[in-house]
Amino acid sequence: MFNVTFYIRRLHSICGIVPMGLFLLEHILTNAEAIGGPAAFNEAIGRIALIPHDIMLVIEIFGLAIPFLFHMLYGLYITLQAKNNPAQYGYVRNWQFALQRWTAIFLFVFLIIHVVDLRIFTKGGGTPISYELLDQMFNNAGWFIFYLVGMIAAIFHFCNGVTTLCMTWGIAKGPRIQTFISRVMMLVCLLLSLVTIAFMISYKMH
Amino acid sequence: MADQKTVHFIIERQDTPDSKPYTEEFLVPYRPALNVVAALMEIQKKPVTKDGKKTTPVVWECNCLEKVCGACMMVINGKARQACATLVDQISQPIRLAPARTFPVIRDLQIDRSVMFESLKRIQGWVEVDGSWEVNTAPIQDPNVAATAYEISHCMTCGCCLEACPNVGPQSDFIGPAPTVQSYLFNLNPLGKFDKEKRLNALMEKGGITSCGNSQNCVEVCPKDIKLTTYLAQLNRDVNKQALKNIFNK
Ligand code: HEM
Ligand code: SF4
Ligand code: SF4
Ligand code: FES
């Protein structure tokens, strides 16, 4: 009754783009400032800090935490509905389908650790986020790889998500346009991944 | 038998719906244009395993033998296919046969596909009022639409697409690509379209079209080459419009 499943599913899809996809893009752009060195990165963080704390908190809770948690929890439920079978049916789209779910499970763990550690314990505990703080964290090879894999997983998940969203909403109907969008989004995925690898490695260079 | 060319089969068997599966291997005399159903018939005639042990004949289903009825669907070398239309020459050996476990197994390769019939009832896979007309009084149909309807009407509920779909199975309540796309066939019908709203609302329920995750395996395996993903996308458009109507028209 009332097609509850339909609306939840469409809401899950929208959340993937707004706010999650937009936030991911913003996150990559801000973090890419690290390529310019400590001063440039800390300045970029300073610009975000200009938003008054009370307004920021409202944005963080209603604009980020709630949609993220909804997409993550319902996404986990969707992930459990699939028996991935790319070993049997090794088509590109089926691999992407499986990767969408594997990255989802990894991101679930990654995002919780990432947010609890940096936003809640570190920043919430009174220590501001800075280039130096991240640099120190990335000195540990384990954290460095964890964050690099987390970022690339999120980028793939988002880009492939845009492709599937065009199918889910019936925007792209035929195989030609669906394949075209998929290729463009995989190109965007490659590009964003390269930017991410560049700013992650720049911590080791400065 | 020594210099007779043979085909090697490894078959996953199961005696009852609940018993444990086991495998048995068979050697079937080769002949040109041998297909999997014909090979199973040879095993039925002489149910002796590769090691010479006498066994029970392997059970499977088939009917039309020309890729029309859908009954002989099974997993052949890892993929869902019609056994009657699978030529031994076209696939690698040893040939592995297994039942399509997306469906309940009855015995050996025989499965119970009745869940698809139940799903067709759910999406109202029929036309409420049908009739016959003189040619000049029949409802007019766009020939392009008729061609699409003809294509979708080829569906033989074989279940290949459900077996290949990662979102269909005991872990999920998805009715699967075939019944979902059949609703589009009846929505295209000049009289069937009067129940379009009912069908679209059924598709918006749990286990309906929203359970599709766009892996597109269905369109790859459909033996009737039905453009399933294209019609799934069309139905996604249609349910969006229906949702707007549900919100703003009542
Ligand atoms: C960086 C964070 C994330 C972003 C930007 C993101 C974005 C997206 C986008 C755009 C889609 C496409 C929706 C569609 O096909 O209609 C999507 C789908 C999906 N997401 Fe996420 N997501 C993120 C994190 C997660 C997490 C943590 C999980 C689960 C634990 C998850 C689970 C899923 C699943 C299962 C789908 C497939 C939905 C479907 O096929 O219907 N996502 N995501
Ligand atoms: S496209 Fe949808 S219906 Fe087809 S196999 Fe993939 S998940 Fe199943
Ligand atoms: S859509 Fe194709 S694969 Fe699916 S049941 Fe019908 S004929 Fe078989
Ligand atoms: S026996 Fe009818 S499809 Fe194979």
Image: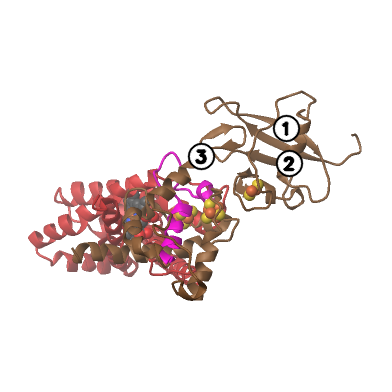
State yes or no: discs 2 and 1 in contact (Cβ < 8 Å). yes
- The amino acid marked with disc number 3 is Phe
Q: Please determine if labels 3 and 1 lie on a single subunit.
A: yes
Residue, disc 3 = B103
Observer-side mark, 3 or 1, equals 3
Q: Earlier in the sequence, mark 3 or mark 1?
A: 1
The secondary structure type at the circle numbered 2 is loop
Residue, disc 2 = B94
- The amino acid marked with disc number 1 is Glu
- The amino acid marked with disc number 2 is Pro
Task: Between residue A134 and residue B103, name the one nearer to us.
Answer: B103
Task: Between residue A29 and residue B51, name the one nearer to us.
Answer: B51
Going by the image, does B250 lie left or right of B105? left
Q: Position of residue B156 (x, y in %)?
A: 56, 52
From the Cβ of disc 1, is ligand 4 less than 8 Å away?
Answer: no
Q: Quadrant of residue B98?
A: top right
Q: Position of residue B64 (x, y in %)?
A: 66, 48
Display colour for chain A: red
The answer to whether residue A181 is visible is yes
- Please tell me which residue is depicted at 44% across the width and 65% down the height of the picture: B189
The secondary structure type at the circle numbered 1 is strand
**Chain drawn in brown:** B
Q: Earlier in the sequence, mark 2 or mark 1?
A: 1
Task: Between residue B208 and residue A119, name the one nearer to us.
Answer: B208
Q: How is the image coloured?
A: by chain
The answer to whether residue B214 is visible is no
Magenta-highlighted residues: B161-189
Residue, disc 1 = B25
Q: Is residue B168 magenta?
A: yes
Outermost front residue: B134
